[in-house]
């Protein structure tokens, strides 16, 4: 019996080692891209292709991204949400296996819609949620336990996806919240998003008014991320800023572009096709920074006539074409 128990423990140990090794290899594939030189000619060609003929795009920049940049060589298709809520997005709406299967199906759909652009799946997890109640910290936000972030990382590794950690700061600031995630943002497969809608600088309760971030806040974040990239020898971080009104992002023209960070302004508004196209035109296309994203709401976008999501073809025809697609 003792020998059988020893053999059983040995088998369990080997299984844990193999699983850990596989997970490490999946993470390291994102780190290994930093060793590949950037194809600048291809980069320029793809950026012009994304512009779809728009005169103000692509935005001129003094420096190319560091080697290992994901964009514009790939399109990212992300599922967004929170583990505590089925109403905040598709990521938390379904059991993990079903959710991941749905995401993989969307990835295949986008691969068919644009066969020239590889697609990388992503889980976009709201790890700090704005709250109507002030809470123990008095900041009107709730920080998710790290074990939840670990769960998201584990799910992402199972389909070779990258991870975005998203912040709804409430009465807090990016200067206070972002450094708390350093151990995760130091990983090559983890990126960042911030939501101005819930940055309540004027003191309103989250959800009562639409919040705001300034270019100064954005530049702090890109500077912080750039420091982590240099410190840990990482490929560039992708940084998502959500937007659907003008005041959500002020002084956009002062946003600093850095080789260590790839900046995406994500159209976050919901509604029918015409409304979404208009929001994109005025607040994303009309105030260019670097890359663009587009959010599709499985539920909210179909509430009013014509009761349908924008098609992938319609999204790809936008000027510029979004390189980051998010489903909520």
Image: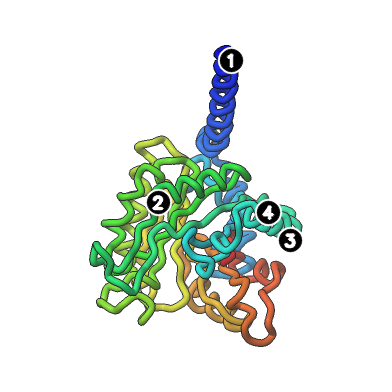
Q: CA distance from mark 3 to mark 2?
A: 31 Å
Q: Quadrant of residue 218?
A: bottom left
State whether residue 185 is above or below residue 327.
above
Viewer-nearest of discs 3 and 2: 3
The image shows residue 151 at horizontal and vertical percentages of 50, 47
Label for residue 258? Answer: 2
Q: CA distance from mark 4 to mark 3?
A: 19 Å
Comparing 297 with 251, the one in front is 297
Comparing 220 with 161, the one in front is 161
State whether residue 175 is above or below residue 245.
above
Q: CA distance from mark 2 to mark 4?
A: 35 Å
- N-term-proximal mark, 1 vs 2: 1
- N-term-proximal mark, 3 vs 2: 3
Q: What residue is at 31 percent from the left and 72 percent from the top? A: 133
Q: CA distance from mark 1 to mark 2?
A: 62 Å
The reply to whether the C-beta atoms of the residues labelled 3 and 1 are less than 8 Å apart is no
Mark 2 falls on what kind of element? Answer: loop
- N-term-proximal mark, 4 vs 1: 1
Residue 61 in view here:
no
Q: What residue is at 47 percent from the left and 47 percent from the top? A: 190
Residue to which mark 1 is pinned: 1
Q: Residues within 10 Å of mark 2 (few under 14, many from 20)?
A: many
Viewer-nearest of discs 3 and 1: 1
Viewer-nearest of discs 4 and 3: 4
Viewer-nearest of discs 4 and 1: 1
Label for residue 113? Answer: 3
Q: What residue is at 60 percent from the left and 60 percent from the top? A: 94
Q: Residues within 10 Å of mark 3 (few under 14, many from 20)?
A: some
Quadrant that contains the N terminus: top right
Residue to which mark 4 is pinned: 101
């Amino acid at each position: 019996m003792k020998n059988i128990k020893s053999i059983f423990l040995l088998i369990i140990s080997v299984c844990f080692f193999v699983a850990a090794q596989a997970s490490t290899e999946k993470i390291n594939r994102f780190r290994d891209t930093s060793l590949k030189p950037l194809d600048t000619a291809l980069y320029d060609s793809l950026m012009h292709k994304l512009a779809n003929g728009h005169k103000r795009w692509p935005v001129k920049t003094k420096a190319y991204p560091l080697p290992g940049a994901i964009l514009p060589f790939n399109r990212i298709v992300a599922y967004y949400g929170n583990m505590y809520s089925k109403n905040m997005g598709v990521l938390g709406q379904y059991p993990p296996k079903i959710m991941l299967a749905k995401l993989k199906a969307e990835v295949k759909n986008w691969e068919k819609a644009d066969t020239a652009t590889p697609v990388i799946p992503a889980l976009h997890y709201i790890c700090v949620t704005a709250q109507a109640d002030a809470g123990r910290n008095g900041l009107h936000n709730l920080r998710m336990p790290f074990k939840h972030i670990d769960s998201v990382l584990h799910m992402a590794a199972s389909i070779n996806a990258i991870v975005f950690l998203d912040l709804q700061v409430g009465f807090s600031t990016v200067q206070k919240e972002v450094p708390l995630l350093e151990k995760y943002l130091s990983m090559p497969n983890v990126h960042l998003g911030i939501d101005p809608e819930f940055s309540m600088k004027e003191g309103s309760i989250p959800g009562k008014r639409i919040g705001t971030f300034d270019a100064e806040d954005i530049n702090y974040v890109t500077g912080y991320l750039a420091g982590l990239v240099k410190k840990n020898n990482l490929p560039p971080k992708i940084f998502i800023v959500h937007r659907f009104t003008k005041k959500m992002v002020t002084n956009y023209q002062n946003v600093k572009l850095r080789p260590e960070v790839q900046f995406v302004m994500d159209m976050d508004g919901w509604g029918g096709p015409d409304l979404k196209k208009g929001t994109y035109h005025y607040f994303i296309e009309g105030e260019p920074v670097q890359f663009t994203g587009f959010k599709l709401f499985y539920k909210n976008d179909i509430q009013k006539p014509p009761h349908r999501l924008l098609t992938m073809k319609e999204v790809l025809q936008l000027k510029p074409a979004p390189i980051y697609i998010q489903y909520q």
